[in-house]
Image (cartoon, helix red, strand yellow):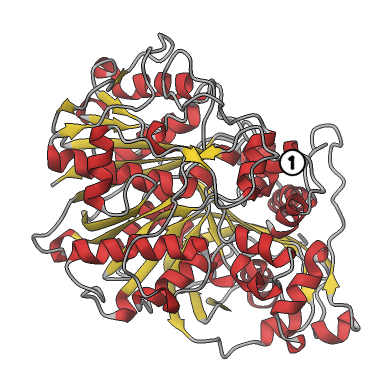
Amino acid sequence: MCGRLPLATPERIAVSAAGVVTPIGQDLDTFWSALLTGADGISQIERFPVADLRVGQGGEIKKLTRAVDWRRVPDCRATRLLVSAADDLCVQAGSRPLDVEPDRLAVVVGTALGGVEEGERALGGSPRRLARALYDAPGHGLARWLGARGPVVTVSTACASGATALGMGAEMLRRGEADAVVAGGYDILCRFVMRGFDGLRSLTRDRVRPFDRRRSGLLLGEGAALVLLRREREAGPRRLGTLLGYGSASDAAHIAAPDSQGRGIERAMRAALAEARLDGADVDFVSAHGTATPLNDPIEAAALRRVLGARGATVPVNSIKGAFGHAMGAAAALEAILCLLAGRHGQIPATLGLEERDSACDIDCVQGVPRAHRPRISLSTSLGFGGCNAALVIESA
Amino acid sequence: MRAPRIRAIGLLSGWGRGTAAIPVDASEAAGGRPVLTVERPVLDPERFRRSRRECLMGVAAVGAMLEDAGQGPEAIAGERTALLFATAAAYAPSNREFIEARGGSMYFPYTAVAAVPAEVAIAFGLTGPYEILVGGAPATMRAIARAAFLLETGACDRALVLAVEVFEECVDLFERLRSPLDGPLVEGAACLWLEPGDGTLTFERRRGREDEVSVRFQLGEMLACEPLATLALARDSAGHEATQVHGSWRGETARLEWSTAPYRTRPRAA
């Protein structure tokens, strides 16, 4: 949606509830408290061997603590993270099963890795796990647990997947294909992805320092984040906010690195704002991708300055990746939820790991302590391998 | 929703190039072969030195689509072209190689589902809306519906719907997952060029397997490529009538129907 307005004003899509599972909290309230207090979710990885890797740390969830009947859930970590987040979502929504006709409940999830760990295990001698190795298997597992009999869709725009899922879920509601959509993203830490990023020398031996002068790379994390989307006119009074806009764009520049000018993420942001019928001057807060790689942060900061215009240096920005690493397919959905919680609580969490701001990242990244600020309009940005870019515009309730 | 018009189709399959190579009966034509493979396309060896076969198949399918349209790459370059990619399993060979440590770390980015459309976007300078769906035929049909939405709302002037499936490197794994009665696995890469059109497009889905399997009887198992191959066949046989496509995957069946003939031009060899 490269800057041109759609023909008609899109129907407003409410976010009625949300649920998360992360290394710093396995429900919405704990997650939010941990972000505000600066909890550090990075630890030595224990669930699989990392001794041969350059970096063995990440945002690992040590134990799933929700009281779910796991006998009804496949022994697949990705599916179990999704179910944990869905269980939290149901609590927040006030009912399980969700109060929707099963045939009218859709599931749209984004992932960078799908069930790849099941593929590792299948090739390692557990062939019965093979069927779970397909990237859309965890999404179908989630749908079964929810009792959803509507469409089940998996998207994989790498680390922008969670944003793509929310955008696609909103369109599904506007077209009347479903009455409610559980949308979001997930990914797990496994040897496959740790070995890949370790080999690329993308992982830091220091801490994750988004937008910091000394930043030296990312660490990976795991998690799942889901929202319940409904058409606003049917959503009822219980809501966290409204999804106003979504945009995507391809870089067409490099298989793994972002476009050096940030043109793709800029197009995605402008498209999301266009769908929301807003422009950069309306944005009160940015939940940035902010991976803390030397390349990403200044490119993203410059793109934000272009889109936000005159207020670009003063709009508060946060990156959650300092708190528990880059949660890949879950990241964008978590960052969207952060926007909603910031609006609800009137606070912007500090960016953990940011101590010495990089002058090449000329944005107002919240540093040190949370800032009292209640954003009405938030922008969330996501970039991924393969030149994937996506952005969301969110209005707080 | 408003139906998009199909301007061109590029199709490569394990049967050969275009629709002329597709047999009447896939099982009989396969002669017991479990997989019909697409050879690695021969493209610029320097530019594509690290690219995997499935990526090159995607690039070649777009090239075949441009040939079908009688256009050069400049006709699709830029931010007004959307790219929507669908696959059920094109990532499987790269993932397997990386798991079995046959690929070095520089190949890790090629394990992403996004690797195929990324190579296509880079090769043709496609910088518009960009989405990737995972699944069989219904995922591709949903991608067409998404493209229709993007065209209808003015988010793009044209949309490419690309699907790629490869099986050769993981045939032993796929054979464990399926019934021998399903027919041969047929690799494919296909791309549809869509632009604003007339009439309406209906996209529906329901639980359960599809009843209509005649296309699969003819094509073999092409997963996400099946709807695009079906549209190519339909253009050859009934290009001036309303067109329906069916497809199923994981217990879900989808149907896509154009109220009027969706093809812009007379059939042409892809």
Q: Where does label 1 land, which residue?
A: B107
Q: Where residue B136 appears, x then y in whole percent?
A: 60, 70
What residue is at 63 percent from the left and 41 percent from the top? Answer: B121
Crowd tier of the residue under label 1, counting other residues whose Cα lies within 10 Å: few below 14, some 14–19, many 20 or above: some
Using the image, name the chain to which the residue with label 1 belongs: B
Residue B135 appears left or right of A380: right
Type of amino acid at the residue the image marks with label 1: Tyr
Q: Where residue A378 appears, x then y in whole percent?
A: 24, 36
Q: Where residue B218 appears, x then y in whole percent?
A: 75, 82
Front in this rendered view, residue A127 or B71: A127
The residue sitting at the top extreme is: A359
The residue sitting at the left extreme is: A237
SS state under label 1: helix
Residue B22 appears left or right of A249: right
Occupied quadrant, residue A108: bottom left
Residue B210 makes an appearance in the image = yes
Q: Where residue B24 appears, x then y in whole percent?
A: 80, 84
Front in this rendered view, residue A183 or A86: A86
Front in this rendered view, residue A31 or B68: A31
Give the quarter of the figure containing the N terminus of chain A.
Answer: top left
Occupied quadrant, residue B209: bottom right
Eyeballing the image, is B194 above or below A352? Answer: below
What residue is at 52 percent from the left and 76 percent from the top? Answer: B242
Residue B151 makes an appearance in the image = no
What is the number of callouts on the image? 1
Residue A367 appears left or right of B38: left
Front in this rendered view, residue B147 or A259: A259
Eyeballing the image, is A326 above or below B222? Answer: above
Occupied quadrant, residue A315: top left
What residue is at 19 percent from the left and 72 percent from the top? Answer: A95
What residue is at 33 percent from the left and 27 percent from the top? Answer: A351
